[in-house]
Amino acid sequence: MALVKHAVVTGVSSGIGAAVATTLVDEGWRVTGLSRREPEVVGLDWIEADLADLDRVSAVAAELADVDAVVHAAGLQRSAPLGSLDVADLEAMWRVHVAAAEVLVNGVVDRIADGGRIVLIGSRTMTGNAGKSQYVATKSALTGMSRSWAMELVSRGITVNVVAPGPTDTAMLGDPSRAHTPPRTPPLGSFIEPAEVAGLTAFLLGPLGRNITGQTIVQCAGASL
């Protein structure tokens, strides 16, 4: 009988994180979910954790064991044009997008099984987007960080990748804090569904994704064309 694999997923209370957790549970994974609010996902083990609280993230990481995969999907978006930037917005996004990923993975890396997987949820806007420079800065940082980790972990067969979706149909699209940059429907005609991002993530976590590492995979419905 095959052993049940264990995935740790952040941001499971909504959006992409919830979709990833649901997909993995449905595929037979044991999922530990981290989020501020209790999720509606059935079948996962939930740990209350604000991903902006790095001490809390570190404490949770220290208690996790037998990890086969980590998916960092927690996120937020605040946007403003140059001349109206608030460094507090940058700090808030950096803590959740970059620092929380660093603290979590750093804390569990010795307990990730050889052949394990790490996926960070980035953004198609990582290459630049008017009015989103701070958000872009945090999401683009994931590419360099993940490639560095991929180099460090390749001898253990652990893959590290970024999934970078374009405009995804989550609550973030209507968040007032991104009012300066309203979403635009991409060329293929519809926003990306969280389940589609979850499907790509699950592929990278599965047996057919074992030879993909150090990559940023854009899933944008033509928005980057």
Image: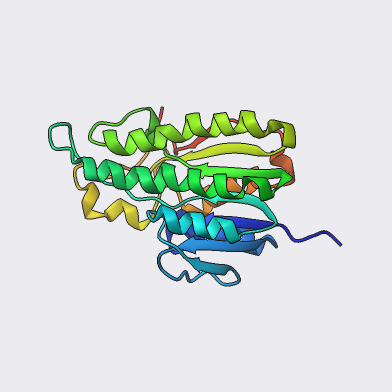
Q: Is residue 171 above or below residue 150?
A: below
**Pick the front one: 9 or 55:** 55
Q: Quadrant of residue 128?
A: top left
Q: Is residue 126 above or below residue 31?
A: above
Find residue 122 and report its horizontal and vertical position in percent.
45, 40
Can residue 190 be seen in the rendering of this structure? no
Q: Residue at x 34, y 58 (%)?
A: 171
The residue sitting at the right extreme is 1
* Type of colouring: rainbow
152 displayed left or right of 189: right
Can residue 143 be seen in the rendering of this structure? yes
Find residue 42 and report its horizontal and vertical position in percent.
56, 72
Find residue 219 and report its horizontal and vertical position in percent.
49, 38
The residue sitting at the left extreme is 83
Q: Quadrant of residue 25?
A: bottom right
Locate the N terminus by quadrant: bottom right
Q: Quadrant of residue 211?
A: top right
**Pick the front one: 6 or 62:** 62
Locate the C terminus by quadrant: top left
Q: Residue at x 43, y 53 (%)?
A: 74
Number of marks in picture: 0
10 displayed left or right of 151: left
Q: Residue at x 58, y 34 (%)?
A: 149
Q: Residue at x 52, y 40 (%)?
A: 163
**Pick the front one: 49 or 220:** 49
**Pick the front one: 171 or 5:** 5
215 displayed left or right of 114: left
Find residue 206 and report its horizontal and vertical position in percent.
70, 47
